[in-house]
Image (cartoon, coloured by chain):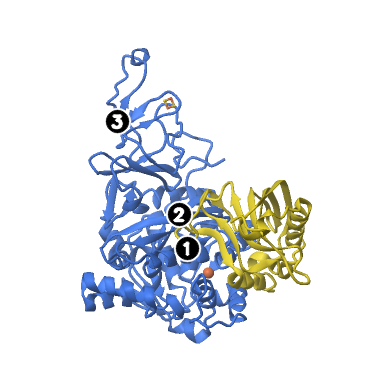
Amino acid sequence: MNGAVATRPIDRAAVEEFLFREARLLDDGRFEDWLALFDEDGLYWIPGLPGQTDRFGAASIVHEDRTVLRMRVRRLGHPRAWSLMPLPRTAHMLGGVTVSPAENGAVEAVAALQVALYRAGGRTRYDGRQTMLLRPGFGPGGGDFRIALKRIDLIDCDGVQGVMPVPI
Amino acid sequence: MSRPVSRSGDNSLPPPPGAAEIAALVEPGRVHRRAYTDRAIFDLEMERIFGRAWIFVAHASQIPGPNDLIRTRLGLRDVLATRDADGRVHVVENRCTHRGTTLCSVERANAASLVCPYHAWTFALDGVLRSVPHRKSMPASFDIADPRLALFRAPRVADYRGFIFASLAEDGPSLEDFLGDMTDALDNFIDRAPDGEVFQEGGLFRLEYRGNWKLHHENANDTMHPGFVHESSVNAAREDSRDYAEPVFDEHQAHVQMLSNGFSVREWQSLGLQGLANGHSYMDGFYTRGILSPDRDDPISRSYRDALEAARGREAAAGILAMDRFNNLVWPNLNINAQYQQIRIVQPVAPDRTVVQAMCFRLGGAPEGMFHRAVRFLTNLSSPASMIFADDAEIFEKVQAGLADGSREWLDQSRGIDEAVGNGRVASAGASELPIRGQFRAWLDHMAARELRPGPL
Ligand code: FES
Ligand SMILES: [Fe+2]
């Protein structure tokens, strides 16, 4: 699919800036704004198996489109969401970002990801690789990109896990 | 970190609690906190419950062929369920008899023998020691056939239509006697497959919470908690009005699963609870909407029903599909949801630590879409990021934390105690803590070696 758009040079700095801002929204608990970054058919996917390719034939830790993600975000603001009291705090760290062209003018941005999470009773850390499929964004507030896919492959995705209370 | 289960020969430890002391922890309507917090009680549970009762270890489809093995647990013991070349299933300890090394460090394997990674002692899949390198350096008394050199093996392994259980007791009730009427739930699980076989597929989750293992089963048939504990996901789903005819990628399963916990007081009361012997129990199903309702009617459900009718006949198929129960609990470690092809296994780790394994199954002969629904159900209800399980786990941790400092002596379990009377199978309306009382009757029977006392729960 090497149409005219695919040959447009990738603005690497803009991609990185977008990734950092997306992570910052999560760290700041601005979940509605975070949800708005997803494209209409955008997906948030944390596979349950290493290298998982089948989204429907094997269980995922998270596998949500905007309709489900919207409910998740609503729940995050609920006063009696027990696993969210007090609201966990996170600190995202992204490194080793690579960007490459994808189909239909989209950009694939891959990064190493570490998320430190603090909640009442303890700290957890999530380590893995984040793969984002980004489409050029349009419209006010849409920013430079829209998220078509945010995929996180945790190094211990099939290991023993505690509760993951907030999106990472 | 953990104290050994057996205290023999170690004078530094106090004697285990006696039968009278244990019996004093359980009264009809309340139970003492020590049952959840005390290490000595926990150790006794591992010895007398997980060391005696029938414990679910694996499904036959996880070790389908010769030399297949899966790593699982029997109480605190790290064990392997193996299928030898002749097709026989064994449950052997995953510990080398030379110096205790863990033999198998992967979750599943296919191997004709178990070779220790340290000095290469080699064991057959039934645990018998087959060879040791450099035999001539072993003492003259070394006898490779000495049973003490074989891997510790569960003396009883039995299979109910592919569901494999093991018991560390040499004798005791048969698996079928132990299961009693809970065989209905297993039968229904399997009978839902048009070709009569189910297969564990689609991955699995291992969820850890910082709470006692008993809390999971106590909660699973607690019909009163969902409206409170799951209020946030119920509300999130309620605010999201939906047209179920509209096609969406998950067929509205997340929405339906979250919404369904929001039943009213009247709905709790109309849900039936059944308490059975040996601590088992179940409740009526409560998914009445969309693709999770028993009478769902959509292209996938229809083609599935056609396949089941072709295999069993119309009437039998209707009977199979009509059984609508939720959380069939085989105490102490198995939770079955036949109509959604789900099971959970409860694995104690410490008095205040538990791992729950959650997995789904493929129905042999059913359309692929049915399996995808089972996978989706597993993600929604049992993933670490589940919006439903997260709140249950948080409550378990709050209970455990509340009991930890000893200021609160007793946990109440008296809800509905005036209502239900009966022997063996006891029915009650939904707002009862009958299942918890039944679990503690079985607990006491194991822990204080009492006779089962039939009577009101
Ligand atoms: S510890 Fe296993 S062979 Fe030595
Ligand atoms: Fe619950």
- Residue B375 vs A116, above or below: the answer is below
The answer for which chain carries disc 3 is B
Which residue does the image show at 28% across and 74% down from the upper left? B306
The answer for which chain carries disc 1 is B
Looking at marks 1 and 2 on the same chain, the residue that comes earlier in the sequence is marked by: 2
Name the image quarter holding the N terminus of chain B. Answer: top right
Q: What is chain A's hue in the picture?
A: yellow
Dots 3 and 2 on the same chain: yes
Q: Quadrant of residue A135?
A: bottom right
Which residue does the image show at 27% across and 78% down from the upper left? B318
Residue B16 appears left or right of A24 = left
**Which label number is shown at residue B378?**
1
In the image, is the residue at mark 2 within 8 Å of ligand 2 by its beta carbon? no
Q: Amino acid at mark 2?
A: Gly
Residue B195: give x, y in percent of width and height. 25, 63
Looking at marks 1 and 3 on the same chain, the residue that comes earlier in the sequence is marked by: 3
Q: Residues within 10 Å of mark 2 (few under 14, many from 20)?
A: some
Residue sitting nearer the eye, B8 or A40: A40
From the viewer's perspective, is the residue at label 1 or at label 3 nearer?
1
Which residue does the image show at 51% across and 80% down from the upper left? B246
In the image, is the residue at mark 1 within 8 Å of ligand 2 by its beta carbon? no
Which residue does the image show at 32% across and 78% down from the upper left? B322
Q: Amino acid at mark 1?
A: Leu
Residue B349: give x, y in percent of width and height. 51, 49
Residue A154: give x, y in percent of width and height. 59, 50
Q: Which residue in the structure is indicated by mark 3?
A: B147
Q: Which residue in the structure is indicated by mark 2?
A: B203
Can residue B225 be seen from the camera position used here?
A: no
Residue sitting nearer the eye, A54 or B288: A54
Q: CA distance from mark 3 to mark 2?
A: 37 Å
